[in-house]
Amino acid sequence: MGPLPRTLELFYDVLSPYSWLAFEVLCRYKNIWNVSLQLRPTLIAGIMKDSRNQPPALLPRKALYVKNDVRLLGQHLQVPIHLPKEFFFVIFKKGSLTAMRFLTVLKLEHPELLEKVSRELWMCIWSRDEDITEPQSILAAAEKAGMSTGQARGLLERVSTPQVKNQLKETTEAACKYGAFGLPVTVAHLDDETYMLFALTRWSCWHIFWERSGWALCLQL
Amino acid sequence: MGPLPRTLELFYDVLSPYSWLAFEVLCRYKNIWNVSLQLRPTLIAGIMKDSRNQPPALLPRKALYVKNDVRLLGQHLQVPIHLPKEFFFVIFKKGSLTAMRFLTVLKLEHPELLEKVSRELWMCIWSRDEDITEPQSILAAAEKAGMSTGQARGLLERVSTPQVKNQLKETTEAACKYGAFGLPVTVAHLDDETYMLFALTRWSCWHIFWERSGWALCLQL
């Protein structure tokens, strides 16, 4: 028997294209890396507020860079990213509250569907420029991921319950406790240590953690 | 005969530990990648001002993350980084103006020594916690890199001449024109396109540029 899988938590928001990229990489490699991947739907607006950080797109030169960077990374990682036409309006005005609450209740009730529905929501906003603040878009994403209309409607009706609101808040607070100032955040739990990595810039560093914990891995990204 | 080398410009400041990491990676790989590396000493304070960006270390949670990240990357890339004790004072108060002007005049007069002296200055500030605002530190770095005391003193006397001041300003403006909002910035010149990459987070993307330009490379970082 090989070593037990280590746990990686991925804190993400479908409003964040970098979260999508990290999500796809981790979903692809989790078996190869022998990791137990825990998907944690988080509210990026809550993280920014709590850390007093500013979205990079607020600075014109950064916004230009981020747009190109996301396109290039999409090509490199073969994730079909196409930026929405009204980039700023989508990010700063529309937000992702209902969608992230939907993923939160989905995780509580049908965790086995969380990966697929999350991906479909990213496809909506970051590939097909659809409006995820519309309940119809959320329902359509859920159905594409294999849910029945009834199932999806049932969950959507629960997004404003205190249980769901509190759960999303708790997850967002958990990310903040790990030191998050943006998303995605990946947290690795090793024997007696916990490491937090921001964005998807440092995959090649993971091997240091694994080696320290006596767990050899080969990441080629 | 193989293809002609492509040009990579590296805009850097010795005040930036990420610049050091990018610099070492590019110096190591330039021959393997068949690139002509042009080192361009730049003033990070000028870039931040022009782009209206804020140093990440101003946000407490980011500062904590950056410190750990720099340490980890140093281990990963085998660059002997040890953070200065008075991290904030070094970055925000002391700055790097004289050191960067010294590298500017060095590039004009002895470009063959630029790589070595730059490395020695990073060793001062980011490995041995020495004060690079002291002329003695700059002279010592120059001598370690192989310059005579007389040569080094001669250059140091010229750091405040209009020629040197203007040259550093011009290089900083050139980085801004490429869209810089921090350092390091690496600019790749291909046949008919120019690409700017910020920091050292996207090496794996370069292959897209090369492939587009019909120039195959294999980067494993």
Image (cartoon, coloured by chain):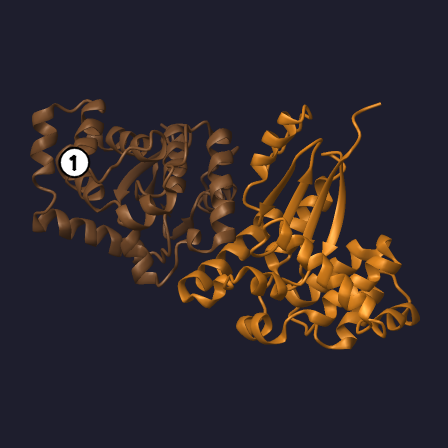
Chain colours: A brown, B orange
Position of the N terminus of chain B by quadrant: top right
- Residue A34 visible: no
Q: Position of residue B128 (x, y in %)?
A: 66, 68
Name above or below for residue B179 compared with residue B49: above
Local secondary structure at mark 1: helix
Q: Chain of mark 1?
A: A
Residue A43 shown left or right of residue A183 in the figure:
left
Name above or below for residue A161 compared with residue B140: above
Q: Position of residue A168 (x, y in %)?
A: 19, 49
- Kindly identify the amino acid type of the residue bearing the numbered disc 1: Pro
Identify which residue is drawn at 50% across, 40% down. A69
Position of the C terminus of chain B by quadrant: top right
The residue tagged 1 is A135
Identify which residue is drawn at 34% across, 62% down. A51
Name above or below for residue B158 compared with residue B7: below
Identify which residue is drawn at 43% across, 51% down. A57
Residue A133 shown left or right of residue A35 in the figure:
left
Residue B206 shown left or right of residue B122 in the figure:
left
